Amino acid sequence: MAASPASGWRANLVLYAALGANIGIAVAKFVAAAITSSSSMLTEGVHSLVDSLNQILLLYGQRRAKRPPDAEHPFGYGRELYFWAFVVAILIFGLGAGVSVYEGYLHILDPEPLRDPLVNYIVLGIATAMEGTSWVIAIREFRASKGDCGWWKAIRESKDPAGFIVLFEDSAALAGLIVAAIGVWASHAWGDPRIDGAASIVIGLILAAVATLLAREAKGLLIGERANPDLIAQVRAMLEAEPRITGVNHVRTIHTAPERVFVAISADFDDSLAMGEAETLIERIEAKLKAALPQLSSIYIRPEKREDAGVVVPG
């Protein structure tokens, strides 16, 4: 059943909060950079503009991923979201990090004296409050979804890139604001505008590190990752509980979307089962699995003798 508009908005709360914050912050940073000639503020403006584009791309990817299966894509379009997540990582690296390092390098080669830093401090304070709000929302949503799992393990196990991408972006944004503030202050305190350019390079390196982490996670999702080990173990346990199944050879899974899993099962059935009885048993098992684990969008069960199943690979 399709989600209601309210539930759909609630599901994308993290993205909408980050998008609203970044658009407002980008405008303020560009104005401050124009007034004060601050390289780090210009870099931060580009950073927020790239983040805004990223949120738009993730929302677009989510909408495209919800298209139903068709003849050409029988498992649906869910993994298109993973493609757009990879594009986001490229944008952060190419536009965010690249422009930041280049702008900082130019500012070091040809430093421009900074004007009154008060505007920068005001914008940085507002930006920190807005980015902090978005970051808190992202933290709360991700904490609620990760359960008892550790933070880093939850990120590695997550199959929904929108949540951890915003979390990474907001964390990088807050770190960038701190670096920008230090760069602006030090440039004025020590009368050396090149420090502001160095701050831009540091911000670029932070973005490059975040982009590298995101690209690695997005690559794994694009290639295809197995489902959560707990889900695999639950499927295996339900199969092993069937009295007419003498052994489970393998349970292989792959995510076709954040909340959709394809599972292929090889099991050794009781040799006394007739063909019709085996078909009835398979249908009953499939119905039982889907009722217990609704994220199993497609289930394939193959009766196969253990000695014919080849190498038994866990999960």
Image (cartoon, grey):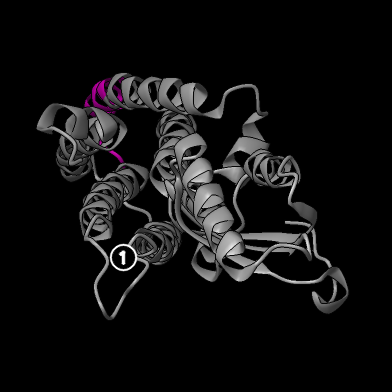
Secondary structure of the residue carrying tag 1 is loop
Quadrant where the C terminus lies?
bottom right
Where in the figure is residue 147, as x and y percent of width and height?
Answer: 58, 23
Residue plotted at (64% across, 22% down): 148
Q: Quick check: can you spot residue 255?
A: yes
- The residue furthest left is 5
Q: Nearer the viewer, residue 172 or 146?
A: 146
Q: Main secondary structure of the magenta part?
A: helix
The x, y position of residue 264, in whole percent, is 60, 64
Question: Which residue lies under the disc numbered 1?
Answer: 77
Compare residues 95 and 295 and report the one nearer the observer: 295
Q: Is residue 119 magenta?
A: yes
What's the residue at 31%, 75% (across, down)? 73
- Quadrant the N terminus occupies: top left
Segment colored magenta: 114-126
- 224 relative position to 45: left or right: right
Whether residue 116 is visible, yes or no, is: no
Position of 56 relative to 23 (above/below): below
